[in-house]
């Protein structure tokens, strides 16, 4: 193998490679239980049950903060509340219809504000984050407004685009229940209570609409969640939900099921969701080997083109050892045992790093994403650790499970 061992070469490789557009993780807002769940998969039974899932992480929205935080959505409401993702800051925005708050990757609140009465007439039903403009789009079902988050904690948002009335998507006016920004086209996508989705300009001009219920996944009105796949290189690659099922919808005819979301239709775990969001966070598959308690792979940040740095982490490794991190374009299914440890990557690596393991058993490798990288580029990685001495319960060579990162837009 011709292995590259410095970060500049990996960045050049990332910039040159191109693959089909696809997804990474989906965020679902369970308003009744005041919970946000991050979903990878669900695991694909036809491909070694990769990736690990369906619930990657979750957090409760209420908690201690300088001002009120979103709570549970009252029973009997339809479509109230939503979730959106600020991929550059790796933060998740949540609303219960009254309060809007941002949470860090640990689920801890970092900002919260109320929606002043002049902005919208009713509670917030849908919310989307615009990474290019660093703004939030909010809708009460009939109107939409673009705001910038407060510059001080618990402050007042600034209006960027004054509210306007949303167009009718089908033969009968239906309340819009979610709104999202397409980073490829710079337009808005919405879904409504009558089972329609629509594409519109940021001034509210309807460009197209179509009914997606029942469709191949058997969705039923009202639609309650919509997210745009920001890792797609073409516009209109969507995830749409009726609160119980998520369907992948490619309005341009492009795109296929992906490693992160291998199933075209899947049931939402944990409860009925009122809103969807999309992230470019890494996902994981497989378990390590060479020890009864093998090292673990992890990551921070999101794989954002031209402004993101994702860091691949390692924990639980022998202090003083050397950790090697190869990158490949292809996962192995099934895995292959090499020297008694599982190999989850096709052995022809296109890049490789080596890092010393510190006294706490940790190591990390930062992966900046260059502005010339292709959207939807997916790479796979796995740590291999050469221990300085044989372990009591295993050989000197250890491995972690594997990870996948997919590049996407803000």
Image (cartoon, rainbow, N blue to C red):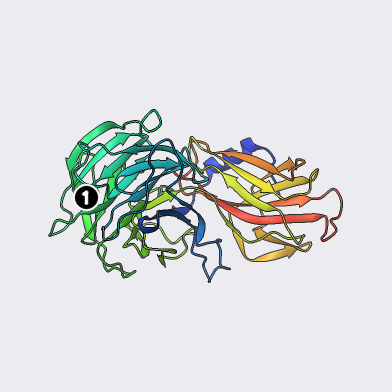
Q: Residue at x 45, y 48 (%)?
A: 279
Q: With 309 as the anchor, is 265 left or right in this view? A: left
Q: In the image, what residue occupies the spot 44% across and 62% down?
A: 257
What residue is disc 1 on?
141
Kind of element beneath mark 1 = loop
Q: Based on the displayed image, in which of its 4 quarters is residue 352 positioned? A: top right
In the rendered image, the quadrant that contains the C terminus is top left
Residue 385 visible within the image? yes
Question: As drawn, is 308 to the left or to the right of 286?
Answer: left
- Residue 258 at what x, y percent from top left? 47, 59
Q: Is 293 left or right of 106, judged from the image as shown?
A: right
The residue positioned 49% from the left and 37% from the top of the image is 372
Q: Residues within 10 Å of mark 1 (few under 14, many from 20)?
A: many
- Spot occupied by residue 19 in the image (x, y as percentages of width and height): 49, 51
Left or right, residue 390 beside residue 73: right
The percent coordinates of residue 67 (x first, y second) are 39, 37
65 w.r.t. 75: above or below: above
Q: Nearer the viewer, residue 212 or 146?
A: 146
Residue in the picture at 16% in, 58% down? 170
Relative depth, front residue between 232 and 15: 232
Q: Quadrant of residue 68?
A: top left
Whether residue 20 is visible, yes or no, is: no
């Amino acid at each position: 193998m011709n292995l590259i061992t410095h970060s500049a070469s990996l960045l050049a490789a990332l910039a040159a490679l191109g693959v089909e557009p696809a997804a990474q993780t989906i965020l679902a807002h369970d308003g009744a239980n005041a919970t946000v769940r991050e979903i990878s998969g669900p695991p694909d039974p036809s491909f070694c049950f990769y990736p690990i899932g369906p619930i990657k992480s979750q957090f409760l929205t209420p908690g201690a903060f300088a001002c009120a935080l979103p709570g549970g959505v009252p029973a009997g409401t339809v479509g109230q509340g939503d979730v959106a993702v600020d991929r550059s800051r790796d933060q998740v925005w949540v609303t219960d219809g009254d309060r809007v708050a941002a949470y860090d990757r640990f689920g801890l609140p970092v900002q919260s504000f109320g929606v002043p009465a002049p902005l919208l007439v009713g509670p917030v039903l849908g919310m989307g984050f615009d990474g290019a403009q660093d703004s939030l789009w909010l809708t009460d079902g009939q109107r939409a407004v673009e705001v910038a988050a407060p510059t001080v904690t618990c402050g007042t948002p600034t209006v960027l685009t004054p509210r306007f009335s949303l167009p009718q998507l089908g033969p009968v006016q239906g309340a819009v229940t979610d709104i999202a920004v397409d980073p490829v086209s710079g337009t808005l996508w919405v879904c409504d209570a009558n089972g329609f989705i629509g594409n519109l300009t940021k001034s509210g001009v309807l460009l197209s609409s179509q009914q997606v219920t029942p469709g191949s996944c058997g969705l039923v009105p009202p639609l309650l969640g919509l997210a745009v796949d920001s890792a797609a290189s073409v516009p209109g690659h969507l995830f749409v939900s009726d609160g119980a099922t998520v369907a992948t919808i490619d309005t341009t005819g492009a795109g296929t099921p992906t490693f992160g979301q291998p199933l075209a239709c899947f049931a939402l775990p944990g409860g009925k969701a009122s809103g969807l969001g999309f992230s470019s966070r890494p996902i994981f598959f497989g378990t390590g080997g060479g020890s009864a308690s093998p090292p673990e792979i992890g990551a921070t940040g999101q794989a954002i083109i031209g402004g993101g740095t994702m860091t691949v982490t390692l924990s639980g490794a022998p202090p003083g050892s050397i950790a090697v991190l190869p990158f490949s374009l292809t996962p192995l299914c099934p895995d292959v045992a090499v020297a008694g440890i599982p190999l989850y990557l096709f052995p022809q690596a296109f890049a490789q790093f080596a890092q010393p393991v510190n006294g706490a058993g940790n190591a990390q490798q930062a992966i900046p994403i260059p502005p010339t990288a292709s959207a939807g580029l997916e790479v796979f990685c796995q740590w291999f650790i050469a221990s300085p001495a044989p372990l009591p319960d295993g050989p000197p060579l250890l491995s972690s499970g594997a990870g996948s990162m997919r590049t996407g837009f803000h």
